[in-house]
Image (spheres, rainbow, N blue to C red):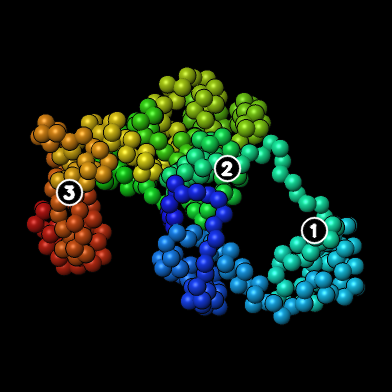
């Protein structure tokens, strides 16, 4: 997540003084396409504190318009061109697109928003007025955007703020923030780091201790479980009615909440949680954000065997994620079936360190081991 200015600062319009050196960096970046614009923007943000990506984009647009200033002003266009544009905007649709294209073909390099701006000034299209139902963004809401961007999805942020997902996406873009969730772990990566089995993580998800990006149940696993319970290969009649009902609430009807799945299968939600732990029902997206992982360490960290984590990982989680680590938890005995997780071996071929018995499976398939693999396998026999 890129943060170029203080999220607690005032959100009112700011006057930015652009130095010629900064403009020169942006102009050079424009000559190298999208990648050059990104690199130039990153360099400007590093040089000038207090700027956002939105400020750089606005400046890039003004520089582009200044570079295309050799085009005549719309008030100096011939009357035939003005009449063509007026008829296109009055008729709308395809006629308007053809009129705009004809004007831009006549004046190469004309900014894309010039025809619409001129048409609005001439009164050919009505000025858009703010809807009475649209509420402005408050400073508290924008502070929340700065806090949650990069950690929560746009849909989740919209649910927290009581706004639409489109409004949240538009506001994030205007602030120069990314909508993508970048910080976190996949289900498998978290499993390898904590040295726990997949069933234990699924149990945390089922009881609500571990929040994932999309805990809804996939339609494929739901239908497969239904078929295994009924022995039928036909789509259940409830599926069609349920899809129609869910279509009114969600855009994608291939995902079902736990309550809808329980209703379809004729069981309670507790049984659905058991099937999630047993992997008979699969969730849509098991990505875990940093904030969700931190909450797990605080609430259920005592259930993790900290001996298996290793000293460095244990200290890192204790300092950064509030993992409860005491003398008693460090001195816990490791069960016999988990002692192999304390042994770290290094592959003689690729020199990759590995924990537990996965080393023996790796040594058989490693392509870089060669003769060293034979000697290790011989020693193991």
Q: Is residue 187 visible?
A: no
Q: What whole-number distance in Å separates the C-alpha atoms at marks 1 and 2?
A: 26 Å
Relative image position of residue 218 (x, y in whole percent): 51, 37
Indicate the quadrant where residue 46 lies.
bottom left
Q: What whole-number distance in Å separates the C-alpha atoms at marks 3 and 2?
A: 44 Å
Relative image position of residue 116 (x, y in whole percent): 77, 62
Q: Is residue 74 visible?
A: yes
Q: Which residue is mark 1?
A: 120
Q: Judge by depth and name the residue closer to the eye, 234 or 342.
A: 342
Residue at x 18%, y 38% (from the top left corner): 306
The secondary structure type at the circle numbered 3 is: helix
- 148 relative to 56 in the view: left or right: left
Relative image position of residue 193 (x, y in whole percent): 26, 46
Indicate the quadrant where residue 289 lies.
top left
Q: Which mark is residue 312?
A: 3
Q: What whole-number distance in Å separates the C-alpha atoms at marks 1 and 3?
A: 63 Å
């Amino acid at each position: 997540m890129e943060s170029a200015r203080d999220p607690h600062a005032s959100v009112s319009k700011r006057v930015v003084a652009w130095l010629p050196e900064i403009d020169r960096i942006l102009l050079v970046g424009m000559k190298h396409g999208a990648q050059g614009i990104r690199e130039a923007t990153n360099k400007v943000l590093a040089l000038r504190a207090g700027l956002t990506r939105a400020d750089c984009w606005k400046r890039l647009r003004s520089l582009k318009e200044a570079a295309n200033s050799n085009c005549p002003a719309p008030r100096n266009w011939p009357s035939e061109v003005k009449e063509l544009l007026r008829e296109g905007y009055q008729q709308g649709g395809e006629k308007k697109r053809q009129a705009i294209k004809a004007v831009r073909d006549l004046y190469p390099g004309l900014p894309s928003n010039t025809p619409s701006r001129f048409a609005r000034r001439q009164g050919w299209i009505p000025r858009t007025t703010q809807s009475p139902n649209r509420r402005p963004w408050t400073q508290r809401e924008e502070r929340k955007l700065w806090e949650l961007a990069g950690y929560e999805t746009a849909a989740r942020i919209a649910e927290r703020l009581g706004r639409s997902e489109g409004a949240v996406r538009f506001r994030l873009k205007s602030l120069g923030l990314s909508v993508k969730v970048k910080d976190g772990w996949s289900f498998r990566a978290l499993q390898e780091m904590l040295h726990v089995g997949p069933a234990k993580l699924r149990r945390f998800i089922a009881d609500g201790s571990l929040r994932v990006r999309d805990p809804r149940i996939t339609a494929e696993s739901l239908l497969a479980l239904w078929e295994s319970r009924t022995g039928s290969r036909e789509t259940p009649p409830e599926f069609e009615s349920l899809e129609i009902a869910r279509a009114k609430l969600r855009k994608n009807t291939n995902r079902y909440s736990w309550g809808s799945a329980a209703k379809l299968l004729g069981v309670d939600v507790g049984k659905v949680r058991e099937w999630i732990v047993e992997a008979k029902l699969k969730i849509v997206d098991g990505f875990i954000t940093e904030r969700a992982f931190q909450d797990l360490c605080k609430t259920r960290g005592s259930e993790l065997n900290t001996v298996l984590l290793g000293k460095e990982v244990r200290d890192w989680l204790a300092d950064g994620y509030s993992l409860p680590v005491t003398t008693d938890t460090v001195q816990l005995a490791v069960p016999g079936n988990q002692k192999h997780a304390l042994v770290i071996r290094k592959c003689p071929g690729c020199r990759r360190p590995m924990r537990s018995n996965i080393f023996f499976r790796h040594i058989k398939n490693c392509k870089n081991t060669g003769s060293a693999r034979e000697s290790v396998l011989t020693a193991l026999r």
